[in-house]
Image: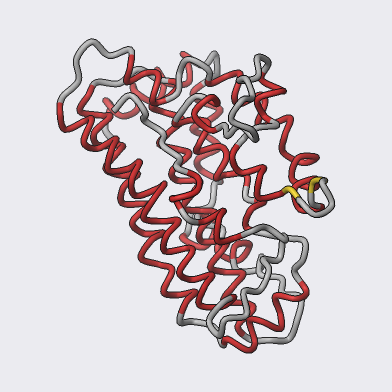
Amino acid sequence: MSTEILKQIEEKYRKLGEQPEKHLQGFVHAKPINYWDYIQVDTLLSLQRTRTDFKDEEIFVIYHQITELVLKMMSHELQQLAYEDHPAATWIDKLQRLQRYTSLLINSFDVMKYGMSYDDYNQFRLTLAPASGFQSAQFRFIELYCTPVDNLLTLKEPQDRLPETLEEKFEYLYWKEAGFDREKNTKTLTLRQFEKKYQPQLLQLAREVAGHTLEEKRQGMSQAPRALDEALRSFDYMYNVAWPKVHLQTAQHYLDQKGETQAATGGSAWKRYFHPRYQRRIFFTSL
């Protein structure tokens, strides 16, 4: 080992207030890292817990776990743009990453659409209620990093005034409409479960990121390269239009292929929930 590397190691631990010799001695006994431990392969492959004996249910579970990991990659990039200061070139790079992640989600839906038996899916899905992809909190995290809460609201009546407090605004979030049973005039169990688990966390994130969302930070830039705005628009379109439309087509394949118009496991009006025509969700309204 070169003297220069040893100096760097010593400097690293002295800055931490630690004794370099103690850590160097520890290296003598440390086992070499391997792929399966670093990636936690055994743990990852043990997380598929199905509720039935239908073989394709495992495909369903794995696909949704992959989706959650992709959403986590997206949140990872969005957190950096929201909480840190970066030059325009870094913004463009990270937005291009977000486009690639979203493209992965869009193109991967064929795994679901053509990768499961229609009849088997419509049997094992009966055991999943009231669980629903609607309950994925990472969708909501991504929205809050991207745009102010006011851009995610839908007033129940045209004459309604915009609520003032954050807690009141949360009752008007567009996606809560999908968790409301109009016949019973009450929230569905799917929505009640989700709110109980995640609403405090979502409220906290909304407070923390207020003023730092990507939309607000872009508005605060005196000048921005055209490429940055185009990257924002492209990500907005891919995430809020292209991906929901593909999701809708896949749902139609399994829930409405024969004109059955079956209900979603969470009981939502899934056609209205997925189709961009009804939600008209736009992250970067200033563009």
Q: Can you give x and y, in whole percent of width and height, for residue 174 in the image?
A: 59, 39
Q: Is residue 224 left or right of residue 97?
A: left
Q: Can you give x and y, in whole percent of width and height, for residue 108 in the image?
A: 40, 67
Judging from the image, the colouring scheme is secondary structure
Question: Which one is in front, 166 or 97?
Answer: 166
Question: Which one is in front, 176 or 29?
Answer: 176
Question: Which one is in front, 257 or 62?
Answer: 257
Q: Is residue 220 left or right of residue 87?
A: right
Q: Is residue 136 left or right of residue 148?
A: right
Q: Can you give x and y, in whole percent of width and height, for residue 36 in the image?
A: 51, 63
Q: Is residue 16 above or below residue 36?
A: above
Which residue lies at the image location 55% right of the left edge and 45% below the top edge? 139
Instruction: State the quadrant of the N terminus.
Output: top left
Q: Is residue 29 above or below residue 259?
A: above
Which quadrant holds residue 109? Answer: bottom left
Q: Is residue 102 left or right of residue 115?
A: left
Question: Which one is in front, 38 or 251?
Answer: 251
